[in-house]
Every structure is written in structure tokens, then in C-alpha cells.
Amino acid sequence: MKIAVVGSNMIDLITYIDRMPKEGETLEALDFKMGFGGKGANQAVAASKFESDVMMVSKVGDDLLGVNTIKNLKECGINTDFVTIQKNKASGVAPIFVDKSSKNSILIIKGANKNLSTTDIDAASEQLKKCSLIVMQLEINLETVYYTIDFANKNHIPILLNPAPCLPNLDLNYICKCDFFAPNESELGILTNKQVSTVDEVKEAAHYIADKGVKNVIVTMGSKGVLWINNNKECFVEAHKVKAIDTTGAGDSFIGCFAHFYVTTKDILLSLKKATAFAAISVTRYGTQSSYPTRDELESFVKKYN
């Protein structure tokens, strides 16, 4: 079973702070870390933790960051045949600010990710056709996202779309072409223009999307848990109670873990439970990809909470 991740890579520039400075104010930060990130790469790395057969379609810049991004993906066991270098373009970076309550604020500079195009999908098409699932996000051009969804539909390949960062103009017709649509609660609120501050409000907004024809809506709600809705089922998976210190990349860890277990078991509920546990472990550690647990760590954690 092969998973394809079509999407972004970034270098994360993580600053740990007490609070954000006010306009004109200079504050000393608590710590700084740099690591590999980007929603697409994070999801690919999370899936690869379970030795899934993962390929990635992405773009890096012709700089040292790009070279090291490809090296990191290879070291994680990810096929990088279709991670190409864009000449005269910088790699993507993401300045991230994490406060003492573990909440984060993120800026992204797409860099070479902007140049991932439909021709890149065409170049990878023969390998993509061999995949059991294609995973996507929105840190690349929307035209490429839509083109890939159409490609997947034409070739009967299930697709999971994680609408992050959220785009209010995301076409509902394309959302309905996805087998899995996986926003977090804030993204769901933006897309539906509905309140999502409580679980009941999230359910109402998720049903609004599902009623439009989306096959499976999966809403991640951090410490509140995960909601799964399809045309005949509503299921809620409670989050594990852990002490969070850094939530950066937790949503991506969930998606990547879910992708692995779904393609290997086809059991959606089991996959949701495994992914919820995987993400819970990740928030107890600093960093993004560096916070993702191993298969053994996940199984030990699951046994502890069962």
C-alpha cells in the first residue's frame, strides 16, 4: 500500500515566548529551534514512522535549505523522486511563535512551494496511479490542488484534503470530490461561516459540510477530541489528557498517522483512535517532525491509556 503526499515543505523557525511583543516593543524570547516542517512534509514523515511506502510530490528552492530538506525526507524513508529543485527560488520557511500555554502563531513564506504545478503532477502520474491514498493540504497553489483532485477521481484513487491554511474561497464542489475532508475547528468555522466554539457548534458546522455531499468529514479539535461524520454516522473520539508544551505540527501528525492506518486497515475509527494518540504524544515534545513518536512509543502509549 502506497501513500502519496502532494504538498509543501518548509523550514520551521520556532521561537518560544512568554507573549508576543506589542508594536514598537522588543522582548527577549525564551528559546529558539530550527527544524524541518511544512504541512505536506510533516504528514509524509508521520506516515513514514510506521514504515509506510510514502512518496512525496513537492518543490524546494536551490539553496542549502532545499538540499537538506530532500536529505531529511530520504533519511525518513520517503521517496523523493518527485521532490524537485526550483532554480532561482528560495525554499519555503515558517516563522512560528509558541507561548507558555503551548499555543502557536505561524507565518508561512511559500517560496518554491508556490511553483508546484500541474506539470509536476503529470510528471509523477504513473507513480501516483499506484497509490492507495493521496494526501493534500493548501500550502501550494489551489490550481494544483484542484488538478490533483480531478486526477485522483479519474484514476479512482481516494483523496484526503486537509484545508490548511484555510482559504475561504475553497470550492465546495472540489471538497465533495474528496473521500476525506479534514479541517480543524477554526478552519471549519471559516469555511462554513458558523460559530465553532463548542462541540455542539462544531457538530452543526460539520453536518452542514457533510450534508452538501462530502463523504467523510473529520474535524480535529485539539484537546477536545476528534469528530467524524459521514452520511449515516456521527462518531466522537476523545482526546488523551496530556501536558502539552508545543502543539506545532500536531494536526499534521494526526493526518499522517491516520493515512497510514487507513490504507493498511481500511478501518476509519481505528485509524482515528491511533492518530489521536499519535498527536497527543507529539504535543508533549518540542518541535514539529522531531516530536513525532515511533511505532513502539505509540503502542506503549495506547496500552497505557486502554
Image (tube, grey):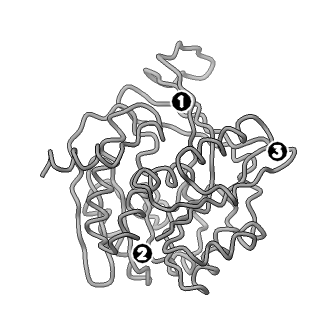
Which residue is rendered at x = 45% and y = 77% of the image?
179
Helix, strand or loop for disc 1 = strand
Helix, strand or loop for disc 3 = loop
Query: Which badge, 3 or 2, is on the more N-terminal residue?
Result: 3
* Left or right of residue 305, residue 220 in this image: right
Which residue is rendered at x = 46% and y = 36% of the image?
290
Which residue is rendered at x = 29% and y = 57% of the image?
274
Q: Amino acid at mark 3?
A: Lys
Q: Which residue is mark 1?
A: 14
- Residue 83, image x, y percentages: 69, 55
Q: Which residue is mark 3?
A: 89
| Image marks 1 and 2: residues in contact by CB distance under 8 Å | no
- Residue 230, image x, y percentages: 33, 78
How crowded is the residue under tag 2: few (<14 C-alpha within 10 Å), some, or many (20+)?
many
- Count of numbered marks: 3
Residue 265, placed above or below residue 257? below
| Image marks 3 and 2: residues in contact by CB distance under 8 Å | no
Asked which quadrant contains residue 227, the reply is bottom left
How crowded is the residue under tag 3: few (<14 C-alpha within 10 Å), some, or many (20+)?
some
Query: Which badge, 1 or 2, is on the more N-terminal residue?
Result: 1
In front of the other: 230 or 37: 37
Q: Which numbered dot is residue 209? A: 2
